Amino acid sequence: MSETRKLYVRSFGCQMNVYDAQRMTDTLAKEGYVETDSPDDADLVILNTCHIREKAAEKVYSELGRLKKAQEVAGRQQMVAVAGCVAQAEGAEILKRARGVDLVVGPQSYHKLPELVADAQRRGGNRRAGIVETEFPVEDKFDFLPPPTRAAINKRGPAAFVTVQEGCDKFCTFCVVPYTRGAEVSRPLPKILDEVIRLAEAGVREVTLIGQNVNAYHGLDAAGRSANLTELIHRIAEVPGIARVRYTTSHPRDMDDELIAAHRDLPALMPYLHLPVQSGSNRVLAAMNRKHDRELFFEIVAKVRAARPDIAFSSDFIVGFPGETDADFADTMDLVERVGFASAFSFKYSSRPGTPAAGMEGQVPEQAKSERIHALQALLDAQKTAFDVACRGRVLDILIEKPGRFPGQLIGRSPYLQSIVVEGPREAIGTLAQALVREVSTKNLTGELRGGEFFNERPARESRFIGQSEKLEA
Ligand code: 5AD
Ligand code: SF4
């Protein structure tokens, strides 16, 4: 191993970027890079970017400007890499637009980072000759990305993300993902299982399987047959130590009956489903090329609720898609009222270069987009508050994830992804418990511990999350 250097990775956008950031950190750890929380003392800064909306993509340029200024003020030499979906979409442009970028690397090439960083280092200060690596290589990057060390898993806590599928073949007309992440690719089931076993052995209790289109998962199993997401979830739920499984993000068209039945049959599958619908108007859904209508969405919601009555839904919405009228928007509000969401993300439509919708007629004026997003968010916020308030007085299962802000406080996660603040010993981190919900605020819930693995019985394994001072072999 070479000398120790410091690495700072900042991720924007989705959970896949969070996972990718971890894998980049793991890869560079082998080269002697140690993670730091501040860009100021880093030798290498990686911006892991998001291209999904214009605002997200523009952030990278302001962040690069800020970094450059800080470097100049401190008289510091720092290597800067741009990774993620903006790197993929506008690699060469980044080098042109932003001074001080040494390396641009797309999401399919992270396994090449050590080599690329060494190359960039050899070029020294000649930044005009920055490297751009945005191919979709034939080899599977996951075969080359080293697994995290125990210490790294410990630092990241008892709830982990695992990418099982990447890319998208759906081609919604507004979306850049098929271009930035490429075609749908699923990782082989045994490799995912190995990763989960390794995480569980280090104390992870909850895994969220992630993919841009995760319920289209179709990876090869050990016998070379194609396995679907339901099979994968069943196998993961059997891994000793794993108590909770989630998956995100799903497409309504791929919510098959088998997967719905898994919500009935598997207690480990959390009763919370993020299922983007985007719009409640059939006209808009067709223009978006969503391949489903509102009726199919209602049907799925009803089936899932029948399978798992305590399930809660979350979703994504876009307002102001080209051609969206007041009547179309009213259909979206109507869908939200009929379904009832525990939480949701909503966005103003953002025209993305290269997507079919960017060239569509009937682009909606900013003013109308703003009015609609306000109305939609008010309704979704009210539903979220109603959902949270209905939890008051209930005892919810929580996974205790980390210490809270104040001494003696712990933060647990409910099945519905609510943060619940409780009082308890740090040693309970990484264990499952029950919390009686007492108070509800916009940020979190406050509760009282009412037993759990740590108190009632010996935990399934000794908690490994008691703090960063703890000694753990790598
Ligand atoms: N404009 C606005 N929102 C978008 N999303 C994806 N593309 C766009 C776009 N061009 C939203 C969708 C998707 C979420 C991840 O981001 O709602 O589900
Ligand atoms: Fe952003 Fe989508 Fe890329 Fe995730 S996959 S980083 S949300 S553009």
Image (cartoon, rainbow, N blue to C red):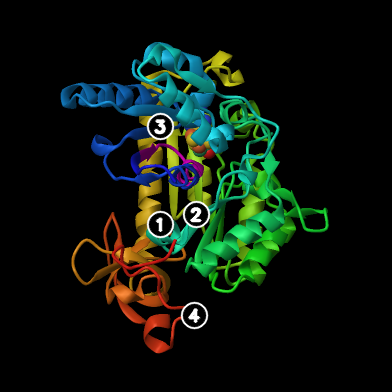
Q: Earlier in the sequence, mark 3 or mark 4?
A: 3
Q: Is residue 162 above or below residue 81?
A: below
Q: Which residues are magenta?
A: 8-22
Q: Is residue 21 magenta?
A: yes
| Amino acid on which disc 3 is placed | Arg
Element on which disc 1 rests: helix
Residue at horizontal 57 percent and vertical 13 percent from the top:
359
Q: Earlier in the sequence, mark 4 or mark 2?
A: 2
Residue toward you, 434 or 66: 66
Circle 2 Cα neighbour tier, 10 Å, few/some/many (<14 / 14–19 / ≥20): many
Circle 1 Cα neighbour tier, 10 Å, few/some/many (<14 / 14–19 / ≥20): some
Element on which disc 2 rests: loop
Please identify, in this view, whether the residue under mark 1 or under mark 3 is nearer the observer.
Answer: 1
Circle 4 Cα neighbour tier, 10 Å, few/some/many (<14 / 14–19 / ≥20): some
| Amino acid on which disc 4 is placed | Ala
Q: Is residue 284 above or below residue 384?
A: above
Badge 1 vs badge 2, beta-carbon distance below 8 Å: yes
Badge 1 vs badge 4, beta-carbon distance below 8 Å: no
| Amino acid on which disc 2 is placed | Pro
Q: Position of residue 197 (x, y in %)?
A: 59, 65
Residue under label 4: 460
Q: Is residue 169 magenta?
A: no
Please identify, in this view, whether the residue under mark 4 or under mark 2 is nearer the observer.
Answer: 2
Residue toward you, 222 or 183: 222
Q: Label for residue 156?
A: 1
Q: CA distance from mark 1 to mark 3?
A: 38 Å
Q: CA distance from mark 3 to mark 4?
A: 49 Å
- List the single residue furthest toward the left: 73
Residue under label 3: 372
